[in-house]
Image (cartoon, helix red, strand yellow):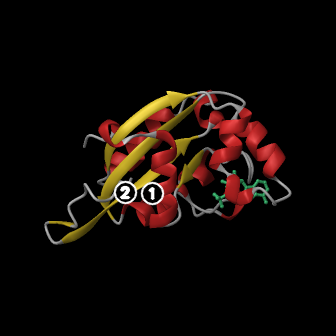
Amino acid sequence: MDFFSSLPKKENGRKMERTLSIVKPDGVRKNIVGEVVKRFEKSGLRVSAVKMVSLTRKEAEGFYAVHRARPFFGSLTEFMSSGPVVVMVLTGDGAIKKVRDLMGATDPGKADPGTIRRDFADSIESNIVHGSDAPETAAFEIGYFFNALEIVN
Ligand code: AMP
């Protein structure tokens, strides 16, 4: 299923995109789900789908399968299954880059001031938020959590 096929190519002459974001277990524990969503919405993105889920270890491993060979795969999937997460589809002009700019660098110590990770994250692994890094990744990640009927906006 191509989750981009239902998207108008352009809205007011701009290229619309969808991306997947996750408020990770540390973001939920810190009670900043609303703060993260507020930053996305203030940047002009629309929430097109949202739900809270508790990932099993296997589900976290499936989501991060591209990182299977990385040394941090075990601790990352343990962390991602350590508590509930909020997964959402965001839609807007250049949504993928916009979300990544708002998140900041993976390592909060290297993230720009004013970014979500710089403001809230404790470490390179517990870094509050995830955002798809490319259209192909976004298509896989959106499909991992949502079916077409659940993406409404
Ligand atoms: P990415 O797909 O690049 O966002 O990486 C997935 C996630 O893996 C990151 O958001 C971090 O939570 C984690 N991660 C990336 N690099 C490291 C690292 N060197 N050590 C521990 N965790 C990492």
Please give the name of the residue rendered at 74% of the width and 42% of the height, measured from the top-left corner: 77
Horizontal arrangement in the rendering, residue 14 relative to residue 92 (left or right): left
Residue 44 appears in which quarter of the rendering? bottom left
Please give the name of the residue rendered at 74% of the width and 38% of the height, measured from the top-left corner: 79
- The percent coordinates of residue 144 (x first, y second) are 52, 45
**Does residue 125 appear in this view?**
yes
Residue 6 appears in which quarter of the rendering? bottom left
Q: Amino acid at mark 1?
A: Ala
**Is residue 16 or residue 149 the one in the foreground?**
149
Check residue 2 in the rendering and tell me which mark sits there, or answer none: 2
From the image, state whether disc 1 or disc 2 is nearer to you: 2
- The percent coordinates of residue 94 (x first, y second) are 35, 66
> Pointer 1: what residue?
139
First in sequence: mark 1 vs mark 2? 2
Please give the name of the residue rendered at 37% of the width and 49% of the height, measured from the top-left corner: 90
Residue placed farthest to the front in the image?
1
Residue placed farthest to the left in the image?
12
Label 1 vs label 2: CA separation? 7 Å
- Note whether ligand 1 is within 8 Å of mark 2: no
Check the image and report above or below for 37 versus 93: above
Residue placed farthest to the bottom in the image?
13
